[in-house]
């Protein structure tokens, strides 16, 4: 629990966007992704302890608004997140988020945080943790299709955790690729801007798809994927929103976060309900195998699960004391006499 002085017990530490950026820079972006990756893996390894449910989604024609709750019995967490693929063209973010941790024993929140930046960090960290178990050994080159908000975080995570040296960028909008190439220029990665998706995947050990389009899209066709590759499929994360041709799924060994949610939202919504998939936590705990051969195509069908946000929030909470990068929010009415809520309001007159 956050170490707060007794007089401040009813105050809730709040991490704004500005303070999140301070935390990122005080740790370093790559080191922070690695740190979050460690928390995510630690929490996947105690998977049975978590309360799990598919996220609660409110769909509209333009996008989706979702709540993602979980609890480990001691701490409760949730994230509010939206996904609006048309937003970018209107000058808004496709994905924005904020989240909260609370004590289970008395229900009091202990952290409120921005999570737009944190979601990009945790999504990249989760992808890298999955790839640690699934990507071919010694993978050096990643194709990155979709060069929007998540792109550079993904590239950094794979450099830091997997050790890739080269990223091959492609986006239908060349301005997005130019932006990503500029932002990655000082990372030490070799950055190659490609003219087509086919060009981007040529010679890649890992293919990341991270596009946003509310339809059954075909970012990768079957002929673009060769034996031994690992696919990190990020962008298909909603009913009716996928990125891969179904034939790729039929040739791949598929790994997922939480099957009841992924069957609704992931690439596997294109398959029969009983199509076999392996859960990531089982791979991480050694109950199931990850990659077993050089020729196997592995697919991480990522949709993003509540425990990953819980882990990321835990990580942020553990940075507060050292960085001081938060303000106390007076968001809990907490009268000295718990029954005298009305009296407290009256006295404020
Ligand atoms: P964004 O809108 O900032 O970027 C998306 C990019 O994809 C844009 O640059 C766009 O031009 C490009 N694009 C669209 N169609 C394309 C195509 N056919 N080929 C190549 N490029 C194409 O969005 P973002 O924040 O980077 O998010 C990307 C996707 O990842 C979204 O669908 C989002 O919902 C999803 N996402 C998933 C997770 C997860 O945990 N799995 C987490 C965050 C975001």
Image (cartoon, rainbow, N blue to C red):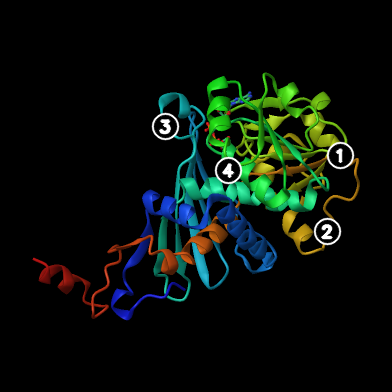
Image quarter (top left, top right, bottom left or bottom right) of the C terminus = bottom left
Question: What is the spatial separation of the Cα atoms under label 1 and label 4, in whole angstroms?
Answer: 24 Å
Marks 1 and 2 in Cβ contact (< 8 Å): no
From the viewer's perspective, is residue 104 above or below residue 127? below
Badge 1 or badge 2: first in the primary sequence: 1
* Front-most of residues 245 and 59: 245
Question: What is the spatial separation of the Cα atoms under label 3 and label 1, in whole angstroms?
Answer: 38 Å
Beta carbon at label 1 within 8 Å of ligand 1: no
Q: Position of residue 74 (x, y in %)?
A: 53, 73
Question: What is the spatial separation of the Cα atoms under label 3 and label 2, in whole angstroms?
Answer: 41 Å
* Front-most of residues 297 and 167: 167
Marks 3 and 1 in Cβ contact (< 8 Å): no
Question: What is the spatial separation of the Cα atoms under label 4 and label 2, in whole angstroms?
Answer: 28 Å
Give the labeled residue for mark 4.
153
From the viewer's perspective, is residue 71 above or below residue 228? below
Q: Position of residue 275 (x, y in %)?
A: 81, 43
| Picture residue at 47% right of the left edge, 57% below the top | 26
Marks 4 and 2 in Cβ contact (< 8 Å): no
Foreground label between 1 and 2: 1
Foreground label between 3 and 1: 1
Give the labeled residue for mark 3.
92
Badge 3 or badge 2: first in the primary sequence: 3
User: How many other residues sit within 10 Å of disc 2, few (<14), some (14-19) or many (≥20)?
Assistant: few
**Numbered mark located on residue 228 in the image:** 1
Q: Considering the numbered disc 2 on the image, is that residue within a helix, a strand or a loop?
A: loop
**Numbered mark located on residue 288 in the image:** 2
């Amino acid at each position: 629990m956050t170490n707060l002085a007794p007089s401040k017990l009813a105050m809730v530490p709040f991490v704004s966007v500005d303070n999140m950026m301070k935390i990122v820079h005080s740790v370093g972006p790559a080191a922070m992704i690695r740190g979050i990756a460690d928390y995510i893996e630690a929490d996947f390894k105690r998977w049975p302890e978590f309360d799990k449910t598919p996220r609660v989604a409110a769909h509209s024609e333009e996008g989706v608004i979702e709540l993602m709750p979980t609890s480990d019995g001691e701490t409760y967490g949730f994230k509010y997140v939206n996904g609006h693929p048309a937003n970018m063209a209107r000058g808004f973010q496709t994905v924005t988020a904020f989240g909260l941790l609370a004590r289970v024993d008395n229900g009091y929140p202990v952290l409120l945080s921005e999570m737009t930046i944190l979601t990009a960090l945790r999504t990249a960290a989760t992808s890298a943790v999955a790839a640690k178990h699934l990507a071919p050994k010694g993978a050096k080159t990643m194709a990155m299709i979709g060069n929007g908000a998540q792109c550079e975080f993904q590239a950094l995570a794979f450099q830091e955790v997997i050790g890739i040296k080269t990223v091959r960028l492609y986006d239908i909008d060349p301005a997005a690729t130019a932006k990503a190439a500029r932002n990655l220029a000082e990372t030490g990665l070799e950055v190659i801007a490609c003219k087509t998706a086919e060009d981007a995947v040529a010679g890649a050990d890992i293919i990341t798809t991270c596009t946003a389009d509310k339809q059954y899209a075909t970012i990768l066709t079957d002929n673009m994927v060769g034996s031994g590759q690992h696919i990190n499929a990020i962008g298909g994360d909603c009913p009716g929103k996928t990125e891969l041709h179904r034939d790729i799924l039929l040739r791949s060994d598929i790994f997922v976060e939480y099957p009841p949610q992924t069957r609704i939202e992931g690439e596997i919504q294109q398959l029969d309900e009983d199509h076999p998939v392996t859960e990531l936590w089982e791979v991480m705990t050694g109950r199931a195998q990850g990659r077993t051969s050089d020729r196997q195509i592995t697919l991480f069908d990522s949709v993003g699960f509540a425990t990953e946000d819980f882990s990321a929030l835990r990580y942020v909470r553990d940075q507060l004391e050292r960085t001081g990068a938060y303000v106390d929010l007076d968001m809990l009415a907490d009268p000295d006499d718990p029954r005298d809520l009305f009296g407290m309001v009256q006295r404020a007159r």
